[in-house]
């Protein structure tokens, strides 16, 4: 099963694949939901990669609201 | 309210902000869920930008599964 942890800044993350994580973070007083690729350095450290997106809470909530429609669309394919 | 539509390839999308979309697409027989920034060209066309990530169905399902924990974590901040 996939891992859950917290990074060096204390932000919780959940793995959605071996090299992709969903996490939350706070920047200048605002919370963001990050969906991002990670890679492992030669010394075994996990670092964020280029591919990914950070959603504001408003964008994340908009995403949560469209999930039922999105799922219905996927299941009808 | 935010828009819903389908792009020039016929893929459904949902706006989660003025310039960000969630969409599904099929590539080489596999379905992907895309969360991506869009920009508008000078002639009014919407084009995908650099920021974004395309999730496989497995990654999307893993994401759906962690949402309750993620939300609980957000609400406890």
Image (cartoon, coloured by chain):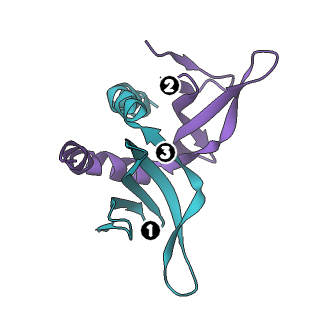
Chain colours: A purple, B cyan
Mark 3 and mark 2 in contact (Cβ < 8 Å)? no
Question: Which one is in front in this view, the residue at disc 2 or the one at disc 1?
Answer: 2
Residue B52 as seen in the image, left or right of residue B15: right
Q: Which mark is residue B54?
A: 3
Q: Nearer the viewer, residue B37 or B1?
A: B37
Residue B38 picture location, percent across and down: 51, 65
Q: In the rendered image, which residue does mark 1 sit on? A: B18
Q: Is residue A43 visible?
A: yes
Q: In the rendered image, which residue does mark 2 sit on? A: A17
Q: Is residue B2 visible?
A: no
Q: Chain of mark 1?
A: B
Q: Nearer the viewer, residue A30 or A37?
A: A37
The mark nearer the N terminus, 3 or 1, is 1
Residue that appears at 75% across and 15% down? A44
Mark 1 element type: loop
Residue A63 picture location, percent across and down: 35, 49
Residue that appears at 68% across and 34% down? A48
User: Residue lying farthest top?
Assistant: A1
- Could you classify mark 2 by the number of other residues whose Cα lies within 10 Å: few (under 14), some (14-19), or many (20 or more)? some
User: Residue lying farthest right?
Assistant: A43
Q: Chain of mark 2?
A: A
Residue B4 as seen in the image, left or right of residue A15: left
Tell me whether marks 2 and 3 sit on the same chain: no
Q: CA distance from mark 2 to mark 3?
A: 13 Å
A48 vs A62: above or below: above
A49 vs A72: above or below: above
B37 vs A74: above or below: below
């Amino acid at each position: 099963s996939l891992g859950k942890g917290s990074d060096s800044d204390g932000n919780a993350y959940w793995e959605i694949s071996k090299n992709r994580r969903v996490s939350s973070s706070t920047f200048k007083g605002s919370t963001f939901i990050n969906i991002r690729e990670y890679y492992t350095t030669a010394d075994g450290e996990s670092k964020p990669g280029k591919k990914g997106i950070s959603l504001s809470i408003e964008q994340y909530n908009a995403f949560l609201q469209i999930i039922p429609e999105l799922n219905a669309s996927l299941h009808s394919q």
